[in-house]
Image (cartoon, rainbow, N blue to C red):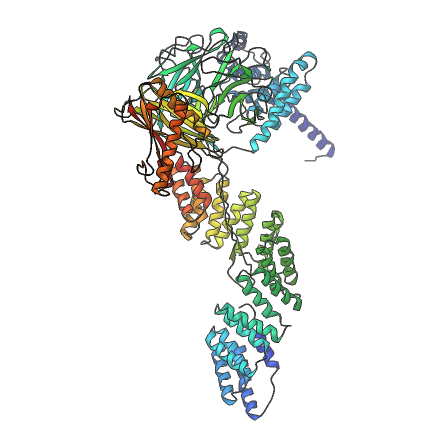
Amino acid sequence: MLISMESVIAQTDSVIVIQGEETQVAEKIYNEGIALYKSQKLDEAIQKFGEALKEDSEFALAYLNRAVVFIDKEDYNSALLDFKSYIQRKPNDAQAYYLRGNVYYAMEKQDDALLDYTKSIQLNPQFDNPYYFRGVIKFEKEQYQDAILDFSEAIKINPDYSYAYNDRASAKKMLDDMDGAIADYTQAIRANPKQAFFYNNRGSAKRKKGDYKEAIADYSMAINLNSEYVIAYNNRGYTYFELGDYTNAIDDFSKAINLNSQYAYAYNNRGNAKYKIKDYQGAIADFDKAIALDPNMAYTFMHRGNAKEMIRDVKGALADWEKAAEMGVEAAATYAKKSKEDTF
Amino acid sequence: MNFRIKDMKKYVLFLIVIGIYSSSLMSQNVEFNRDNFPNRSVLREAIKNINSGEKILKDEYPNYQAAQEFFMLAYKLNPNNADLNYKIGYCIFNDKTSRLGSLPYFEKAYKLKPDVALDIQYYLAQNYHINYEFDKAINYYRSYLNSLSGKTLNDSSAEVYKKINECENGKILIKKEERVFIDNMGTEINTAYDEYGPVITADESVLMFTSKRPLVVNQRPERGDYIENVYISNRKDKKWTLSENIGKTLNTDYHNAVKALSNDGQQLIIYRGDNGGDLFLSKASGDSWSKPSRLPKQINTNYHEASASFSYDGKTLYFVSDKPGGLGGHDIYQTKVDNRGNWSDPVNLGGVVNTPYEEISVFAHPDGKSLYFSSNGHDNIGGYDIFKTTFENGIWTKPVNIGFPINTTENDVFFVISASGRRAYYSSAKDGGYGGQDIYVITFLGPEKLFVMNGEDNLLANKTNPIKEKFIAPAVVIEETSLTLLKGIVVDEKTRNPILATIELYDNEKNELLASFQSNSSTGRYLVSLPSGKNYGIAVKADKYLFHSENFILPDSAKYQEIEKEIALKKMEVGQRIVLRNIFFDFNKSSLRDESTTELENLLALLKENSKMKIEISGHTDNVGSAQYNKKLSESRAQSVVNYLKSKGITADRLSFAGFGFDDPIAPNDTEEGRQLNRRTEFKVIQN
């Protein structure tokens, strides 16, 4: 999770209410627990919270914060139990529902997460995070319009919510609204100019629009911010390819491969670029590599067939096209058919 | 040492003067004179060689290579003479073997002395033109024109402007390189001598061409060149057989060049130099060829008839002639032959196809509408280029240059393309062959293949793993020629011997005989091209045999296919049954459709020619529907045919009819193909 749990701890830290003597003891232990957590001593913190609860079983905050520590340890089941205990005692705490929603999300229980985020929003309509994460789930369910609505709410509450801008942009991109996507990526950048992937994403939207030079500028910016940003090299190479600048394309794909020697996509792409400069053997070698890394790359079989045709390997080309056709590539089926029809 | 500024200036000036002097020495024209070559005998020898070379150049048909040899001897002594460099360039360029070899000499001549010859810039321009350096060529063409005036300018400007235009065309064409393989056909076909003018059968099973190779080893050429002869090669086991001389019937002691081969390979057209250049027709007779007969006066004139091609149905002949009355130079004409073998007056194809320049060769594609020809007009890029035009809606479309690298800046002339459109054949003298002109095969690779790029992005901020871009590649459409090639063997059903048969091709909708071909008497082989867009009836006839019926309904959109079909003819004997594939009825009805007329007429003719023959017409159906219904329908359909024959004068006692419903299938009824075969009308010989 990218949203830090520390903020929760800090908040709860500031709302300690002193009740009776029992509570005072529990509180003391609880504060020790907080201190242990801050020093990264998670197991000891959990123990302390447990001890605090022994002193005062109604000390709700202890449940809440122990749940948070369980989350850090990725012991989601234990966290759920503690959230349940907390919510029983504090049923109107929007943040608790939000945090529990995150746990469900981490456990890939999207629908449960959705319910909790919605509850959180009901309790506190000015809470931005649950809107954001609800939007994320809707995005993942491919409900892009609904996702946009939620991201927009998050942004209304927090006009500098860069992640919400980014994700809203992405949802617009999925709906082919490139201009809308670019505008939102730009807002994300405004809110956080050092985030490399905002530039990468905006670059891809520009590329889809056909603004290749602008796309390259964005990818370059992303790379400047993160010199090991593999997918940005690949995307920039892709854009050079679209421009017909195969030399630079090959260069970028090679850079991606140098950073990640298992990056099948970059091998496929570099193979395509090599084909374009008539380095057919080189192209075939790259396609071989891509397929070895990922035998499900149907299009790459077709590409390899295309290259084999150019070195007069008729049988090899046909075999590759047939393989791609089997995997559902219609164009390859056409190529194979034409090849077989010619019995000359 | 004290070095004053004044000395410095003098020193620098001195250096500059030395510099200018030595660079002028390096680009200075060195004349053949005593000052430059004090050794008298050496100088005299050089001048003698130059004079010998110049003498050869004054001949009517100069031997450029021989002249060049003399000049090169003088060149050894003095490589820096502008005039000599020019002369050497001139020899190489005009010898035409490898014209670009002249460029260094012309460049040097020009550098040494820009006014060495009036046309030095023209030669430079032509070299750059041939070498695809179009911008440079254009500059030199323009510069050349600027250097001319008066009559020379008037005489030259049209030609030079044309060449500038060719360069402009070239710049455009180079950018759209066609995806082709161009391969030399190898030593089965090509030799160190000239091979050119390839022609093929529609299915590429036979190749013929003209060659100027010696007939026997060590034969000496006459008058600088060997005799033109016709050679043939066959396609066997995916290879071409070693080409051989087609034989004395066609190859006489004089020049014989093959110009056209019919789609089925049963007719060819030879060119001979008689009478200014005439065309002769020869027909296959089994394994041999008939003595070529001169095509009639409508076609052959006292002028130069240089190329010809048959249309798909054999009824139109396209040919090239420079007779007067055309649009300039050689033009393409067409003439049609009627059923009695008479040719019509040729008609010029008109100003869309023909130009004031030369249209020098022609090829009609078996699709019945495309015409390929070579011309040095239209938007050529240099020399002759090959163009394509299509006959649509009664007119020829604007010819299109078929593109680079098939068309080059030099002559691209004899071009034929297979029925499938997959391969074409042409001849070229380009570098890298076996010598002289060679025959090349072009393989068309079609439009660029599809390539899909893979990209992914961090679309969701809180997710580490990027999300892949989804992309579904479109289907691709590959253009094809629109025709069906039907080919095979005609044999006797019992003996399996090949038969010389007539194959008649009908348009069932128009009730029109489109064409008539013959199978080969030795092999029985036949080939018919069926352009898409017709309902074809085919009747195969031979003496003493019942005719064989085939039907092909080809919509306009029908794509290229090759169908190999053996046709087994049945003797006229009692008990023989023939399926009539071109009898059509309306759905569920027994009324004959008009498209059946031709078949009915053929049946009628058979009965009239064989007056003792009695036949039974039977109707048959598939197994869809009840037995009773199908019996009734098939019977009334058979009756319709009988009624037609009666109405045309065949007496009732010769005709009987029966309906068999689905009782007598000839194919399984579990596929639509099978069911269609079962839905048929037959006739059976009851008495002969």
In the image, farthest residue toward the right: B6
Looking at the image, residue B144 sits to the left or right of residue A306; the answer is right
The quadrant of the picture occupied by the N terminus of chain B is top right
Q: Is residue B480 above or below residue B468?
A: above
In the image, farthest residue toward the front: B652
Residue closer to the observer: A338 or B93: A338
In percent of width and height, residue B60 lies at: 53, 7
Residue closer to the observer: B73 or B172: B172
The quadrant of the picture occupied by the C terminus of chain B is top left
In percent of width and height, residue B257 lies at: 43, 14
Looking at the image, residue B555 sits to the left or right of residue B144; the answer is left
In percent of width and height, residue B436 lies at: 45, 19
In the image, farthest residue toward the left: B495
Which residue appears at 40% of the width and 44% of the height? A322
In percent of width and height, residue B291 lies at: 38, 10
Q: Is residue A124 above or below residue B450?
A: below
